[in-house]
Each structure stands twice: as C-alpha cells, then as structure tokens.
Amino acid sequence: MASKQLITPLRRALASKVRTNSGVCSQCQRRWQSKVSQRPGSDRVHFPGAVNSKFTTNLSFARATEEDAMPTYRVLDQDGQVVDKAAHSPDISDEEAVRLYKDMVTVSVMDVIMFDAQRQGRVSFYMVSAGEEGIAVGSASALSPDDPIFAQYRETGIFQHRGFTMDDFMAQLFATKNDPGKGRNMPVHYGSTKYRVHTISSPLATQIPQASGAAYAVKTQDRLNPTAEPRVVACYFGEGAASEGDFHAGLNIAATRSCPILFICRNNGYAISTPTLEQYRGDGIASRGVGYGIDTIRVDGNDILAVREATKRARELALSDGGKPVLIEAMSYRVSHHSTSDDSFAYRAKVEVEDWKRRDNPITRLRKWMEGKGIWDEEKEKELRSSARKSVLDAYRKAEKEKRPPLSAMMEDVYEELTEEQREQTEKLTRIIEKYPNEYDVTEFEGGLDSLKSLKR
Ligand SMILES: Cc1ncc(C[n+]2csc(CCOP(=O)(O)OP(=O)(O)O)c2C)c(N)n1
C-alpha cells in the first residue's frame, strides 16, 4: 500500500513532463531554449550552466578575504545582554528559557561524570560537548518533535531535549540489555526510534547524504498526506566532517532536488588535532552553502537564543517554495579534548582553552540573561546542579548492575535467518565457552550461554 502511494505521484510527475518528438521533455526544452541562445548585445551570460552573470572587462579573481567573511548572527552579547534591544526581544517564554538552560546544564553535568567514568575504566569511551551544548539544545528546541534528526556525536543535547531519560543514556553508555542498539555501538552513538533520531554512526559525514535522502522521502510523504504537519530533516556535522565527499554530495542533491533539510554545522575550530586553518582556506563552511545555491546563515553558537531563532527561521524557509535546504554554520570552540582517546594539549596550548572557557560559554551566557530578567538565581542554580548530579549518578549505578544484552544479539538482525557461517560461528563459540568456563564468564549477559543455544539453528 505504502509503496503504491509513493509511486503514484512519481508517475504523475513523469506524465506531466510531456515528451516532444526530439525525445526531450517540454520543460527541459524550454530551459535550454531560454538559456543557451545568447541574445545579440546582451550584457549578461546566458549559458545553460551559468546564472544571470554580467559580462565584465575587469580581469579580477574572486577571492575569499577577511572583508568578505559572512557576518555572525547573535541576539545576546557575552554578558547576556540583548544586543539590539530596539529590534526585538527574544521570542521565548520564561519557562522555555529555563527548560533550555536545564537541558544544557544536565548534559554538562553528565559529561563531567561520564568522562571520569571512562578514566576509571567503567565505560570504554566517551565524548563531551562542552562549549557546544547551546547548538544542540537551541536548534532542537526550534524543531518539531516529528522532524527526523541525523546527528554526528557531539550533540547529546538533542537527545536530552527530545526526552531521553538518564536511564536511556546509561543503557547505551554501559551497553546494558536495555540499550535499543543491543550494545553493538561504541558509547555515545545513541539512536532512538521513539524520538526520531537516527542512530549515530562513526564514519564521518555518512549521515549527510542519508539525511538528504530522508528529506526527499519526507517531502514526498508529506505531499501525500497534506493534513499532517509538514516536516523537515535536521542534519548535524562538524566542520571537519564537511571535508568529506559525502558533504558535497549531500548538499548538492538536497539543493537540486529541493529537499526540506537543515544542515547544521558545528564549527568548533578543531577536527581532533587539525585546526580549521589547516582544514580549509575559504570562509568557513557557510561560504560553501552559498556555492550550492543554499540559503545560509552563520550564527554565534555560544548564544543559544540566536541558534534557536536562526533555526526557527531556517525551518520556515526549508518548508517554503515547495521545500529547500538551508545551511546554518554555528561558530563555537571545542573546549574539551576530542574524546577520551585524545589529549588535546599535545597540539594546542592549555592557555588557549582556559581563555575560551573564561571568555565565553553558552551556559553562562544564558544564565546571565535569565538572572537579568529575574528568573534565575544562585539558589536555583545549586538545586539544579545537585539534582542533575543525583539523577546521573542514580542511573549510572543502576546501569552498572544491569545485565548485558544476550549473546544471541550478536547474531540477530543481520539477516532474516541465520546464515550457514553464523550457525558455524555460534556452534564454535558455544563449544569454546563450555570448554573454558573460567576464562569466559558469561553470567553477566542476559540468559547466559542458554541465549546462544536457543538461537534457531
Ligand atoms: C570517514 C572518517 N574519517 C576519519 C574519522 C576519524 N575521526 C573521528 S572524529 C574526527 C574529527 C571530526 O571533526 P569535526 O567533524 O570537526 O567534529 P568535532 O569532533 O570537532 O566535533 C575524525 C577525523 C572517522 N571517524 N571517519
């Protein structure tokens, strides 16, 4: 039924492209005729592959200079003051502002605890989003809960904002039997069908063309269902990931197929040890959006209200004109080491990091604004931090005691039925575990060895 519904508009679209005797559809023929012929005396280029460009006799090359840098949109300054009071006051209720603040603080409290947990050997790996909480939480707050999301790995705030509980986080981090991914992924590679966030995958930028494809599907589905709220797809990535070929393929297909998608780039200055200076020579990632004909904005990532407003507007744009992509480049600084496997002081000065920590931060900036409005104070701050800490630690202790996913999960969900090779591997594994019980204690796995034996062979 679903595939039939999808095929019908495609047929209609194809049928509307009336074929001419030459085999070229009438729409394409009109485009060629209007662009390819150079009108005599014209002062503009009319080639099929160029836009409305003026001829010039000035021999000069376009150059990415400092003066040309795209401006950075902000609502609050570093002291939490509204920059342009005459223009507008931030479009957010007190309750919503407090909610965003709590989300950011909760993520940062969890980050500190889990980073240490890795150092103590309790989890195998961790990545924090220190300094970038505002980008994830602010943008997520401007999306509809039904908008599908494709994330990289430093956007924990999205999950927090969408409703992930501490138990959900810990199930994935400790790979317990409650992890929907059945412990198959590295820690922080969360995913949730319930909250419409596709599972994070390690190979950089693979999510970008996937997200463009999803946006095309969303557009087609929403057309078939005009009474439903239209959706956009949100796709997050770092500036380092934007050096991958997938970034270019993903943006171009979204632009040419008019897909309703928000590309949200976190430009935090580093891709592990590679600083942006060595990553690219252009004007950040924003200049590339313009190159692909995509509406683009650069925003101050330390200003959660600016991120939220820019995302809200971007979402409206993405749903206009039948759908289109929009690129947001959110500027920030990666305060943390890249991951628990990295020591960033091997390639950057400690003083640089300390300076950023002191100078600006999305959490302190929003806090100052809320204090200025009289909706936040020291007492509330203390209460929030202690309750966040308690909820992380409670869930952490619970998850540590949970069973791990059954051993059988290793073999399931790969093919519809076990293959010959999988059957052999299951038998071998069972034999080895039975032979060396002291070497392989499988009691911590749900169902122990029985789960392997129960696999249909
Ligand atoms: C295709 C691919 N190449 C290399 C890596 C190794 N790698 C993991 S994270 C990373 C840096 C990514 O930097 P960026 O996209 O800027 O995100 P950030 O970590 O700064 O948030 C690299 C090179 C990878 N995971 N996938």
Image (tube, rainbow, N blue to C red):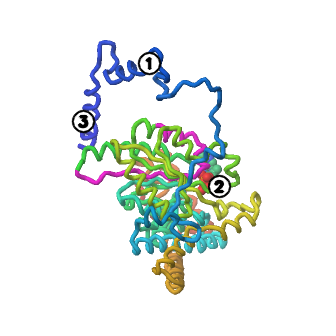
Instruction: Choose the circle earlier in sequence order: 3 or 1.
Output: 3
In the displayed structure, 371 sits above or below 410; it is below
Magenta stretch: give its range: 227-252
Q: Residue 235 lies in magenta, yes or no?
A: yes
Q: Furthest residue to the top? A: 21
Instruction: Choose the circle earlier in sequence order: 1 or 2.
Output: 1
Task: Give me the residue at 54% from left, 84% from top.
Answer: 378
Front position in the image: 186 or 140: 140
Check disc 2: other Cα within 10 Å, few if <14, some if 14-19, many if 20+: many
Query: Tag 3: residue type?
Result: Thr
Query: Tag 1: residue type?
Result: Val
Residue 143 percent location from the top left of the image:
39, 58
1 vs 2, front mark: 1
Q: Label 3: which residue? A: 8
CA distance for labels 3 and 1 = 34 Å
CA distance for labels 1 and 2 = 43 Å
CA distance for labels 3 and 2 = 47 Å
3 vs 2, front mark: 2
Q: Are marks 1 and 2 in contact (CB under 8 Å)?
A: no
Q: Are marks 3 and 1 in contact (CB under 8 Å)?
A: no
Task: Give me the residue at 52% from left, 27% from top.
Answer: 54
* Circle number at residue 36: 1
Q: Is mark 2 within 8 Å of ligand 1?
A: yes
Residue 3 percent location from the top left of the image:
28, 40
Q: Is mark 1 within 8 Å of ligand 1?
A: no
SS at badge 3 = helix
Task: Give me the residue at 45% from left, 80% from top.
Answer: 375
Residue 192 shown left or right of residue 281 in the figure: left
Check disc 3: other Cα within 10 Å, few if <14, some if 14-19, many if 20+: few
Front position in the image: 443 or 148: 148
Q: Quadrant of the N terminus?
A: top left
